Image: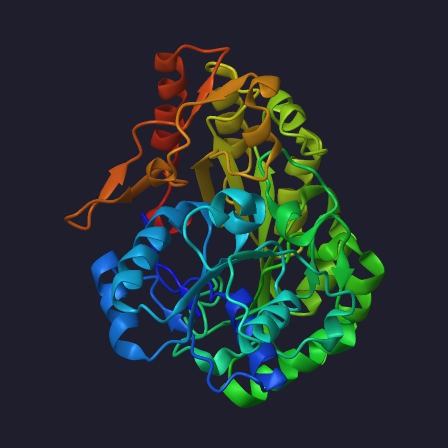
Amino acid sequence: MINPPQPYMIEKHTQVPLGLLYLSAVLKRDGRVREVKVIDLSADSMEEATLKIQNNHSWDVCGFTSTTLDYFMTLKIMKALKLSLENTLFITGGSHSSACPSEVGKDGWDAVFEGESDLSILKFIGDFTAGKKNTKIYKSERVEDLDLLPYPDRDALSWLGGKVLASGNERSINIIASRACPRKCIFCAGGAIWGRRVRWRSPEAVADEIRYCVKKYNVKIFRFSDDNMIGNKKWTRIFCDLIKPLGIIWRMSVRVDDADYETLCLLREAGCVELGLGIESFDPNVLKVLNKQTTLDQSLAAVENSFKADIGARLLMMINTPGETYKYTVDQNIKCLESLKGKFVYLSIKPLVPFPGTDIWNNPEQFGVSIKTRDFSQYNMWMYHLGKNGRKKHTEESILRIHSMSEKQQKENFNRMLQYTETLPETQRG
């Protein structure tokens, strides 16, 4: 199973491919597969990736996880490998195939996995051992009791995860406590993978996994990858009580409407040192069009509450979005950011990119925008990327065309927001 090269990657080894590590653990527990190997290609070029796969193993089945951003490269690698690995089956899963399985199924894959695959991968193994090798789309089967899953196969990788800002320590572990988010932001494709009904691991099971990782890997820094971890306040209270004695530090991302001061104090007492706050924009009209179901006041309060609770706030924002207004949106963003100076530790602003499986992809005109190209090789979520010489290059064009502004005005908004971020220390922006 393979984690593909990442286009425009700025920092490698930030997040482990947790989905692949779960699949590896599920397959090893099942026992029908002779050997399972996970190869990380995230820091490789296409040529390096292809050679690594060819030289690494004798493959019966070669599986790739893929987002929309890296799908074009994944597809190229698969087609190149098919020429030399004639007896190998090639399968794919991940967010891109979950969002558009029928389209991916036409690209020459031997099997395509839609949605979470912990159960459907076992059906594939049954078909494979029975000699059934026709192209097939394996539909998502929800794991209702997440406590029944094995721990991710972290031993399959030579690295654990990226740094947490507040620690400066690069040894950390990714972990997840729940699947799905009930909200319907127009830019999020999470529903295509997990559905909209949140399923929770028990707080006791998550605490047990943390204890296991502390003992086995001698790591006390954790990064939660959940979409909406503190949406269940009862669960949060129990979890915090369980892990408070462990002396770990951890970070996660939350919605601003869940970030009340009382809850954040519980988190801090239990070791939470960093929050990613889904601000998106300080422009109320943008929030409305994005269907964030949050308000400006809630965003401002979330940052203030994080600061008072002594938790470092990472502000997660977007530019070039539906609902954006020439000058006003950027003026409003800068005004609010200036008012919060000294109360957040990091500002991340990215251009909004429409992905398959989202409302904005399916109905862009409904939100006052059009999609300039559906060529995924042109997609980039960063305000900048790495050029061939390794230096940062600014992103020049947005994938979205906002109808309420001229292209010149839209680009001016982008550049003004970029210029503002560059007034911050480099350690506080991205």
Compare residues 130 and 15 and report the one nearer the observer: 130
- Residue in the picture at 51% in, 57% down: 135
- Residue in the picture at 55% in, 47% down: 101
From the top left corner, tell me how far across and down residue 51 is, in percent: 23, 68
- Residue in the picture at 44% in, 38% down: 350
The relative height of residue 213 versus residue 404 in the rendered view (above or below) is below
- Residue in the picture at 73% in, 56% down: 230
Relative to 335, 245 lies left or right: right
Residue 6 falls in which quadrant of the image? bottom left
Q: How many marks?
A: 0
Compare residues 166 and 102 and report the one nearer the observer: 102
Q: Quadrant of the N terminus?
A: bottom left
Q: Quadrant of the C terminus?
A: top left
- Residue 302 visible somewhere in the drawing: yes
Q: How are the colours assigned in the image?
A: rainbow
From the top left corner, tell me how far across and down residue 398 is, in percent: 38, 27
Q: Residue furthest left?
A: 389
The relative height of residue 293 versus residue 109 in the rendered view (above or below) is above
- Residue 244 visible somewhere in the drawing: no
From the top left corner, tell me how far across and down residue 183 is, in percent: 72, 41
